[in-house]
Amino acid sequence: MEREKITLTGAQETMLATLYGRALDSRRPNSVLNDVEAARAVTRIDYDFRKTKMEGTSAVGVAIRAKVLDDWTRSFLDTNPTATVLHLACGLDTRVQRVSPPDTVRWLDLDLPDVVALRTRLLDLPSGDYRLVGASVTSDSWLDDVPADRPTVAVFEGLSMYLHKQDGKRLIERITNRFPSGQLLFDCYGSLGIKLQKLVPAVRNAGATLRWGIDDPHEIETWHPGLTCLDALRSVDMPGLENLPLPGRVSLRVLARIPGLRDAGRILRYRF
């Protein structure tokens, strides 16, 4: 089989690290995510994944973060079985395959056109009411094309920290103003995490830049009437950390006791 040569750089290249992390997790006997589609995609890519420095603790950590967002998405769809899902900056994430929504759900995967083109070559398109859109999350056109007739959940993993704050604020305002009700599910860095970004191998090796840190999750509540923070899980407190290798569990126990560092990363859930 001819493998796909990767030429992505910067923030786009970092999606290969998360893909590889999920693939590595899927090979473990006690896999958190069991993302066999990610493992299959890795075999189709011509890329030196050693550059990502993804192994052990970091790979399981990626899978745990994804599982929290997957579980929140499933929970929303259980309550709203005809909802719209906006999976923003989807990259090579196989979330739609993992969540396996019913045909009554409208699902939209969105990323930049070159990423979408790569995705179509590496991943099978799911059935049902599914659209794959090539556009920037900060543009207006793609959102105007999504019907505003259903409760809507927007999931964006590995996106917020690459945006400027004003762009992140505008994205949240546009989504919450357009749809009648829904949820926002996303991960973020704190300001100290942004300052320490060069310590993250995937970011450093790709030449990417992190910009927006969120220290007070409740600030975002002021961006739309009725926007309410339901969860603000620190990375050191996420469910499933018992699956980390022992060195990872020990490291997180230490980080959890250090002010600033324990807030370096969070996963957020808002209702609107």
Image (tube, grey):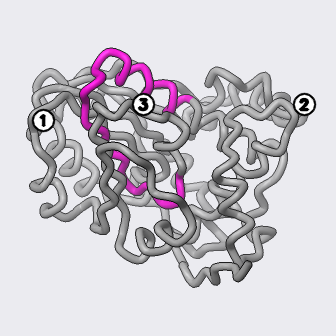
Instruction: Say whether residue 1 is visible.
Output: yes
Find residue 90 and report its image quarter. bottom left
Q: Amino acid at mark 1?
A: Phe
Q: Amino acid at mark 2?
A: Leu
Closer to the observer: label 1 or label 3? 1
- Name the spot of residue 201 as percent of width and height, x first: 70, 63
Q: Earlier in the sequence, mark 1 or mark 3?
A: 1
Placement of the N terminus among the 4 image quadrants: bottom right
Residue 91 badge: none
Residue at image mark 2: 246
Residue 179 badge: 1
- Residue drawn at the location 85% of the way across and 29% of the way down: 250
- Rendered view: 144 above or below 45: above
Find residue 245 and report its image quarter. top right
Query: Is 172 placed left or right of 7 in the picture?
Result: left
Residue stretch in magenta: 68-93
- Residue drawn at the location 30% of the way across and 34% of the way down: 105
- Rendered view: 201 above or below 31: below
Closer to the observer: label 1 or label 2? 1
Placement of the C terminus among the 4 image quadrants: top left
- Name the spot of residue 44 as percent of width and height, x first: 69, 70
- Name the spot of residue 173 as percent of width and height, x first: 16, 43
User: Pointer 1: residues within 10 angstroms few (<14), some, or many (20+)?
Assistant: some
Find residue 138 and report its image quarter. bottom left
Query: Is 4 placed left or right of 11 in the picture?
Result: right
Q: Amino acid at mark 3?
A: Leu
Between the C-alphas of marks 1 and 3, the distance is 19 Å
Between the C-alphas of marks 1 and 2, the distance is 44 Å
User: Pointer 3: residues within 10 angstroms few (<14), some, or many (20+)?
Assistant: some
